[in-house]
Amino acid sequence: MPLISIIVPVFNTELYIERCLDSLINQSLKDIEIIVVDDMSTDNSGKIVQAYSEKYHFIKYFKMKSKGLAGGSRNLGLKNASGYYIGFVDSDDWIDTMMYEKMGITLEKSHADIAVCGVLREYESYYDTEFRYKYQFQNIIEGKAALELLCRSHNQDISISSIVCNKLYRVELLRNNDITFLSNSINEDEVFNFLCFLNAKKIAIIPDTYYHYYQRQNSITHEFSKRHIDDLLHGIRIIKLHLESTGLYELNRKNYYSFFEKSLSFVLSSLITHEQNSAIQNEYIKYLFKKSSDTIDLNEYLDYIGASRLRKFLLPFTR
């Protein structure tokens, strides 16, 4: 069994997949397997990955039989993973050569369930690199506190991103709690991480920035449609149903609404950034309120968040 399984979903990234795979092949930790799942690419991505898998025995190549987006592809990867720890890398991103050795050692020594490192936002020019998440100190955080940092339930010195690619997960956490991704959703990271942090006992924070998150202009994250709203609300609904079925809703009501607020903030920011027509913006917001009525109890939301906090939350989108 390899120590770490790295799962890479691929869809039409022929221009970037070699850079991604080269960063994985050249990890200082050699006890890894790389599982690449092709989500029905129509370019040369599959041919490139196939050539890599023939050259390197630790690269496994799978093809989706139907469209599943990143979540469905990662689920197929999870079914075929044999490592003690699971990492995820998107095919247009890359990682530093020490990433998995440092994160794996941290999990081995701390017995934590999840390790988290910093993220760099990358553009075409090396000089435009920005820190997206950066941690100054190493720390081991209890699961309850880490969930609050993920949900931003309180104002603290650090926060934890909902993306999965800057994290390393203990496979037992995922399998013992039956945690998988939502298929055909662009909100798959959020639900997956909420459930992971809800069930994790300890989370390790690593004061290094290893993950390079490439800002590709034709990525789905640089577009906006009703699907962003639908997938957000579907994911929030899944979380609520899980909390209610496990008897954890009352204990996590504030985390639930804080997580909704955080996710909603991202969707509204994307709307304002990628749709400049105010009339179309209004139509999207009307659609959001209409669709959210069966998912979010606005009276309960105000009770737990407060009108003052809601007003401050909305302020950036009304200027």
Image (tube, helix red, strand yellow):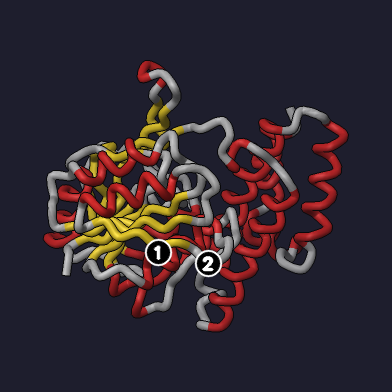
Q: Measuring 42% from the left and 39% from the top, which residue is drawn there? A: 92
Asked whether residue 254 appears in the rendered view, the answer is no
101 relative position to 287: left or right: left
Q: Position of residue 184 (x, y in %)?
A: 60, 61
Image quadrant where residue 81 sits: bottom left
Relative depth, front residue between 178 and 315:
178
SS of the residue under disc 1: helix
Q: Position of residue 222 (x, y in %)?
A: 61, 36
The quarter in which the C terminus is drawn is top right
Asked whether residue 155 appears in the rendered view, the answer is yes
Mark 1 residue crowding within 10 angstroms, few (<14) / some (14–19) / many (20+) = many
Q: Which residue is mark 2?
A: 65
Check residue 248 in the rendering and tell me which mark sits there, or answer none: none
Relative depth, front residue between 317 and 95:
95
Image quadrant where residue 269 sits: top right
Q: Measuring 51% from the left and 32% from the top, which residue is drawn there? A: 216
Check residue 197 in the rendering and tell me which mark sits there, or answer none: 1
Disc with the residue nearer the chain's start (1 vs 2)? 2
Q: Measuring 37% from the left and 58% from the top, which residue is drawn there? A: 146
Q: Position of residue 211 (x, y in %)?
A: 32, 40
Q: Measuring 56% from the left and 83% from the top, which residue is drawn there? A: 245
The quarter in which the N terminus is drawn is bottom left
Amino acid type, mark 2? Lys
Please, is residue 138 above or below residue 171 in the view? above
Image quadrant where residue 292 sits: bottom right
Q: CA distance from mark 1 to mark 2?
A: 31 Å
Q: Position of residue 307 (x, y in %)?
A: 71, 49
Please, is residue 216 above or below residue 225 in the view? above
SS of the residue under disc 2: loop
Mark 2 residue crowding within 10 angstroms, few (<14) / some (14–19) / many (20+) = few
